[in-house]
Amino acid sequence: MAPLQNGTPKIEIAYEICSVDQTNHDRVLRFWTDLTSSLGWDRHAQDSHVHLESATEENWFVVIPQKAPSGEPVSEVGSPQGSIIACHFDNGTGWIGFFVMAEEFRGYGLGGKLFQAAMDSFHAKGIEYIGLDGVPEQRETYGRRGFVETNLISVCSRPHLDNIPPPPAGGLAHGEELISWIGALSPIDMTRSDLEYCGLERSRLWKKQAESQYHAKGLALIGGDKTSKGWVLLRKSIHGYRIGPLYAESRNTASVLLRAIMDSVAEEERSSHPVVAEVWRSNEHAVALFEEYGFETAGTYHRMWYKGKVPPAQAPGGKADQAMYAIYDAVEG
């Protein structure tokens, strides 16, 4: 007899796990977009496109059940009911993101099989640094799969961008200037800087992000020596905006960048558009800085690494603890 679920025999569902390719890309994208929208992920279509395209199709896995839990054939043959992306980065690090299962198919072990497909893709390439950001409800599940919590991320939000508190004392130092991130940083520069602060070398991501200026804007603070002292990105979501990453060599630089990127939002959009940032809690100044600008903590993610192996930048006392104020995105590190 099959294992019990809720006191009755658990149904075993035949399934197929495959990578996304040209034959199923559009169908998978529709599934993913509809499901994440229903779950309230608040992702702008162009933002999702940047994530998905930078991840490469061969590492985007879906599970396709052959029958519904009722035993009846699925409503659409070949329809995906779960998705996960295994992001392979240039420096031998990996990230698990966009892990979703249709509610009807949860609890039948399909999610575990899908997760293992992502892990197998890392192991096949010899990738040892594998990370994810988990919600509190999934922390124990990931722990059983070998992931160890190494940090916490605060999901901080403001309901709108009206009445932003004045900046604290400080501001631009002599010779410093704020300029567009596109004008200041090439994708190569962003990749190099991202690796330094975050420990992930994401060249495909920053190339795609630089190509997608419709939904994103950014600022870099350039010092008198003409080098970058920090930078920040603002991306549109369905209902508002997302801030991140925010990298800065000092608290004052972070404050200048955060205030300036919020001020960059058009006046007519400020009163009705919430803004969210995922804040690196181990930076002792990060949460306090966002609170100074009217953000409140709305949730928590658990930063977890497989077998506790952490890239040096994210290890205790590493560069992230000193200069990462907000991460890019929990779905991609």
Image (tube, grey):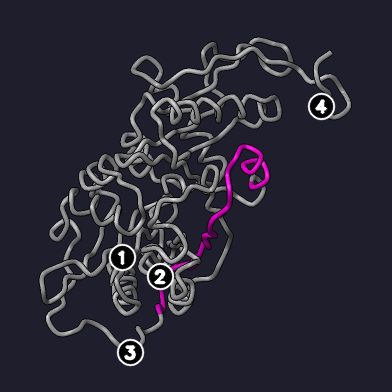
Compared across the picture, whether 327 is left or right of 170 comes to right
Q: Which is more toward the observer, 270 or 105? A: 105
Q: Which mark is residue 5?
A: 4
Q: Where is residue 96 in the image (x, y as percent from the top left)?
A: 47, 39
Marks 2/4: CA–CA distance? 47 Å
> What amino acid type should be assigned to the residue bearing mark 1?
Val
Range covered by the magenta-colored residues: 139-164
Q: Which of marks 2 and 4 is nearer the N terminus?
A: 4
Q: Mark 1 points at which residue?
A: 265
Answer whether residue 152 is magenta in the image.
yes
Marks 1/3: CA–CA distance? 23 Å
> What amino acid type should be assigned to the residue bearing mark 2?
Leu
Q: Which of marks 4 and 3 is nearer the N terminus?
A: 4
Dot 1 and dot 2 residues touching (CB under 8 Å): yes
Residue 304 can be seen, yes or no = yes
Helix, strand or loop at disc 1? Answer: loop
Q: Where is residue 76 in the image (x, y as percent from the top left)?
A: 55, 14
**Quarter occupied by the N terminus:** top right
Q: Which is more toward the observer, 130 or 245? A: 130
Q: Is residue 262 above or below residue 17?
A: below
Report the mark closest to the observer, 1 or 4: 4
Q: Name the residue under label 2.
A: 161
Q: Which residue is at a point 45% across and 58% down the rendered structure image?
A: 315
